Image: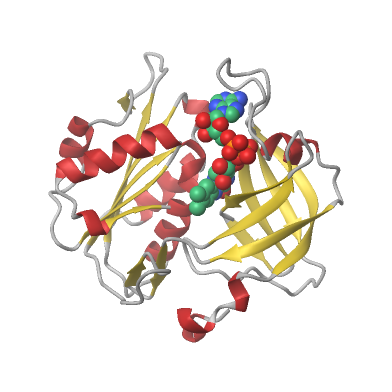
Amino acid sequence: MDQKDFKIESLGEYFTKKFQVTLTQREPINHDSYLFRFDFKNPKERLGLQAVQHIKISGFNLKGEVVERAYTHVFEDDGYFQIPIKIYRPNVHPQFPNGGELTPWLEKLDLNSELTIKRCLGKLCYHNNQFIVRPKLNNTWSQFDTVLFICGGSGITPAYQLIQSICNNPNDNTKMVLLYANKTEQDIWLQKELNEFQAKHKDQFTVHFTIDKFDENWKGLKGHVNFEMMTSKFPKPTETTLGVLCGPKPMNKLVIYLYEQFGVKKDNIVKF
Ligand SMILES: Cc1cc2nc3c(=O)[nH]c(=O)nc-3n(C[C@H](O)[C@H](O)[C@H](O)COP(=O)(O)OP(=O)(O)OC[C@H]3O[C@@H](n4cnc5c(N)ncnc54)[C@H](O)[C@@H]3O)c2cc1C
């Protein structure tokens, strides 16, 4: 879909039609994650999504029931796209003996298998310096001077798309600050890419990493995201500050509360 053709109201089928792609590569990134590559049948086809729109992958859980989960590609070219996916394996976490429903299936799926996906509209649209918050309920474009991001683990992928789009748009001066939380340094996705964006767009984008387990060489923030981190790293919010979040469920609940305490307008808080 071309940027100039982007009109939400005319996109019904675009976001509901299911289609098949082929799993062609699954390269490990770290101890529990892979970069998956999916190929279209047509070598010229693309997902063609705007920043922050994702896809849903359908697969099966242990009981053989169909399950659908959301994923955000970090790279695409003619005929294929790539998504980093964290696997929630069984027998790793005592609270979740069966692991996740979909990702153990994705980890075992044979290469060259076909699987069903669909495109999704998502909770935020970005187009040329303008945003629509919750586009299923609202179709008003607004402008934000600052976007704050708080992400945990694999929740970085939708944020990364938006950061990439804003940094790559020379007409967009939106300021962005990202607070990215992980268990260990090894769990951080896209660290090099985020640091490169920061170096290249110093006046526009800042990233802060925080981890739970660290050694004496760690120079970043320590521990879970908290109010102090926000007050020390984020600019004071205004009417035109957007607060974005994407992480595991318990973290999201806390982050919404923290954003509100920090002073981000309730309507401007968006969970991907
Ligand atoms: C807009 C959006 C974009 C997303 N993009 C991506 C992406 O690009 N890449 C990506 O990897 N994910 C992404 N996600 C998350 C993804 O949609 C799934 O939630 C995730 O893959 C888990 O699916 P699942 O069916 O395997 O686990 P579920 O059955 O949904 O269970 C997941 C939850 O179970 C618990 N759990 C289960 N097993 C374990 C374990 N072994 N260790 C710790 N906790 C466990 C955790 O609380 C975990 O959050 C995105 C989510 C959204 C909303």
> In the rendered image of this protein, does residue 230 appear above or below residue 11?
above
- Looking at the image, which residue is at 52% across and 84% down? 10
In the image, 167 versus 158, the foreground residue is: 158
Q: Quadrant of the N terminus?
A: bottom right
> Which quadrant of the structure image shows residue 123?
bottom left
> Which quadrant of the structure image shows residue 100?
top right
- Looking at the image, which residue is at 80% across and 36% down? 108
Task: Tell which quarter ligand 1 is in.
Answer: top right
How has the structure been colored for display?
Answer: secondary structure
In the image, 168 versus 99, the foreground residue is: 99
Q: Is residue 214 left or right of residue 87?
A: left
> In the rendered image of this protein, does residue 19 appear above or below residue 90?
below
Q: Is residue 25 left or right of residue 56?
A: right
In the image, 26 versus 58, the foreground residue is: 58
> In the rendered image of this protein, does residue 127 appear above or below residue 193?
below
Q: Position of residue 146 (x, y in %)?
A: 23, 59
Q: Position of residue 65 (x, y in %)?
A: 75, 43
In the image, 110 versus 175, the foreground residue is: 110
How many numbered badges does the structure rendering display?
A: 0
Q: Position of residue 50 (x, y in %)?
A: 50, 69
- Looking at the image, which residue is at 27% across and 64% down? 174
> In the rendered image of this protein, does residue 214 appear above or below residue 157?
above
- On the question of residue 212 being in view, the answer is yes
- Looking at the image, which residue is at 38% across and 69% down? 137
- On the question of residue 180 being in view, the answer is no
